[in-house]
Amino acid sequence: MKQFLSPFAALLNLNSGFQPALIWLAFGAFASVGHAQTARVLDAPFLDVLRAEVRTNHPTLAAAQAKVQAAEAGVRAVRLWEDPMVGLGVMAAENMMRREDGDLMFSAEQTVPRRKLYGARKARAAAESSILQAETQSAALKLETLVAQTAVELALADEVVAIATNQVRWLESMAVNARQRLADPAANASEPLRVESELVQEQQRLDTSTRQRTRLVRELNLLLGRPLDAVWPVLRLPDTASPMPQLTDELGRLLQANPMLHAQLKTAEAARADIEVARRERSPTFSVGVDSRVYSGGDFRQATVGAKMSLPWFNGSVYRANVDRARQQQAVTEREIEALERDLRKQIVAAHTEAENAARQAATFADQVIPRAGQATEATQNAWISSKAILFEVLESRRALLNAQLEQRRAVAAQRGALETLRSIVPPTSKP
């Protein structure tokens, strides 16, 4: 507080005519403090609410859940027993032949179930259902990451707007001070023009940042299924970077937590079930049936009970090709699992490194750069008030402080965004 009040006190002692400008300077210096007090912090509970909302409202997940339900119905649709066959025939012949042999023929046939083939098909359908469940979880994580990172961008945009607003008010007060200094015959007449030029440029940047915030608000509303221009509270990022997880822990949880790997593992299970299905389809199919003849006059003539067997050896090359295809597909899936795991590990390392770099950058700016830039700005302003520095030096020192503040907030946002990317690869819990 004292380091911000000292240049104002010097102005009060120098010239009482500077008091209106001092009010503006004090307001500008503490504008960001007021913003920090009223804005909604973008913390973990707030992000969890947004993630739950996007999971509930986004049509992509509704469609994915419908696919899962269809696959679950497909598991129940796998049949053990084939439909029985019944037949009816009528003989057209002389009356004597019809009476002797019977002129009505009835038949029934039932295929004997192949339980091992049924079990393999059931396992194949269950694996397909598990694949879709894992893909649904992966889609949910992508949407959660998108909405969380967009919210981080919105919070950063709000902070940029607050910093730019503070800068505009500071330049407005500087413009008043520069015009008041013209009362001194030795004052530089170009100073008010220079400050006003800076003010116009900063107002344009503020307008651009405000429009950027509007764009991000609309994107979030579209993602969450809200009205396009639904109002969002002013957000702000946490003051410091978030704690960093251990890289070894994240790498160790990859196989257990990543839904894309789960989907590939289930694909491998489906490929193994395909091999079993192809092997079981090579076995013969058996069926039992009964044929009977009845004379329409009411007399029973005969009944025949028999069994049938298919001869799959005529298509042996086809069945062997099916088995080979299933085995090759399993080999492909296993290699794809290994490749995906390597790629995901690389992404974890990249996201973790990016988050760690951003966290250290944010800490450096907060602990070292911004305090020193603030002291330099204060010293330059005091020197300008006592005519020991020129306006250009004041503006440059103030611009350096402004850039340091922006870079610190951008670093916090970058770390938060990288952690969201890391979370999408290794989620903390399994959510459908």
Image: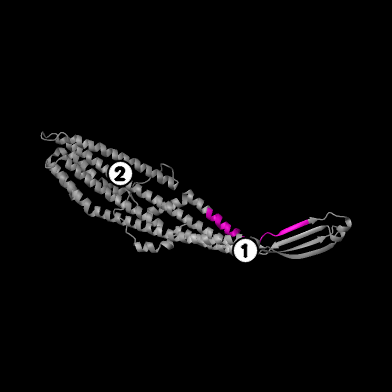
Number of numbered tags placed on the structure image: 2
Q: Which residues are magenta?
A: 67-88
When the figure is inspected, residue 229 is found, relative to residue 86, above or below; the finding is above
Q: Is-magenta flag for residue 70? A: yes
When the figure is inspected, residue 122 is found, relative to residue 365, above or below; the finding is below
* Secondary structure found at label 2: helix
Instruction: Find residue 161 and name its label.
Output: 2
Image x and y of residue 426, in percent: 40, 59
From this viewpoint, which residue is outermost toward the left?
Answer: 186
* Image quadrant assignment for residue 28: top left
Q: Residues within 10 Å of mark 2 (few under 14, many from 20)?
A: many
Q: Nearer the viewer, residue 391 or 258?
A: 258
CA gap between label 2 and label 1 equals 71 Å
* Secondary structure found at label 1: loop
Q: Residue beneath label 1, please?
A: 282
Instruction: Give the residue drawn at x 21%, y 44%.
Output: 398
From this viewpoint, which residue is outermost toward the right?
Answer: 96
Is residue 121 something that shows in the picture? no
* Image quadrant assignment for residue 103: bottom right
* Image quadrant assignment for residue 252: bottom left
Image x and y of residue 168, in percent: 25, 40
Instruction: Give the residue drawn at x 80%, y 58%.
Output: 105
Mark 2 vs mark 1: give the one in front. Answer: 1
Hey, what amino acid is under mark 2? Val
- Relative side of 109 to 46, left or right: right
Hey, what amino acid is under mark 1? Arg
When the figure is inspected, residue 388 is found, relative to residue 313, above or below; the finding is above
